[in-house]
Image (cartoon, helix red, strand yellow):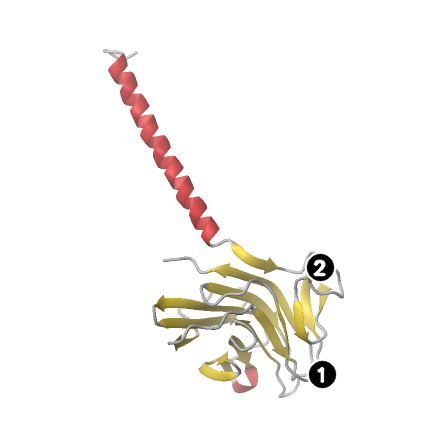
Amino acid sequence: QPAGGIPGGLNTMNSLSKFAGRYLLALGLAALTAHATEPLYQTNFEKTELGEVPDDFLVLDGDFSVRQESGNRFLELPGAPLDAFGFMFGPSARHGNEITARMFGTKKGRRYPVFGIALNGVNGYRLQVAPAKRAIELLKAGAVVAKAPFRWAGEWLQFSLRVEKTSEAEWIISGKVWPDGKKPPAKPTVTHKEAKEPRNGKPSIWGSPYSGTPIRYDDIVVKKIAKR
């Protein structure tokens, strides 16, 4: 025991108490951060029966079904008929959410598919790749509001779309598209500013198999945007 006994013991106890307090605070902050980014919805189709779609999907149109290749399950839209098809899922929101997903398609001659993700319902915001136009497009209620040049090499692509409120009278809709397995771009590929609050609506996935070949979807996630 140190000279004086009790004072040394009290100093040690105080130090341990402070350490424990900081440790618990750090744990609490970590828990809050993890909770803030915890997915609101996610599926990789591994638990869905082959030939079916998840029970919580609202298929608007299209013969979507889960398929498997090399041990991996994914959702597939057949290559016919040549039209626009989609399905809705997950929680409704006006802003503050982000949807991500992986997609794959193939061209046939000079014909290419069009595929993408969306937020805020059927007439909300859609981020899509239009290879025939060599472009990435951001649409609102079916009308293009922003676009950027893009050359698709036929690989799996990663998509990310978010709707954020930046002030009392401004919302930013931003999207990113990049090849699967590569590092995502630091800045959005396309952006659009809104002065009117977006409509409340569910996330959705879309596809138009204009090439006459299937479109595949996997690893769909919806989460809250982490506060800065």
Viewport quadrant of the C terminus:
bottom left
Q: Is residue 182 left or right of residue 70?
A: left
Q: Which residue is mark 1?
A: 81
Identify the residue at image location x=54%, y=57%.
Answer: 40
Q: Amino acid at mark 2?
A: Thr
Identify the residue at image location x=49%, y=64%.
Answer: 98
Of helix, strand and loop, which one carries label 2?
A: loop
Total number of numbered discs in the rendering:
2
Q: Amino acid at mark 1?
A: Pro
Picture coordinates of residue 13 (x, y %)? Answer: 32, 22
Q: Is residue 170 left or right of residue 7?
A: right
Picture coordinates of residue 78 (x, y %)? Answer: 71, 76
Residues 206 and 92: in front is 92
Q: Residues within 10 Å of mark 1 (few under 14, many from 20)?
A: some
Instruction: From this view, report whether residue 123 is shown above or below residue 185.
Output: below
Residue 21 is drawn in which quadrant? top left
Residue 80 is drawn in which quadrant? bottom right
Q: Which residue is mark 2?
A: 48
Residues 208 and 72: in front is 208
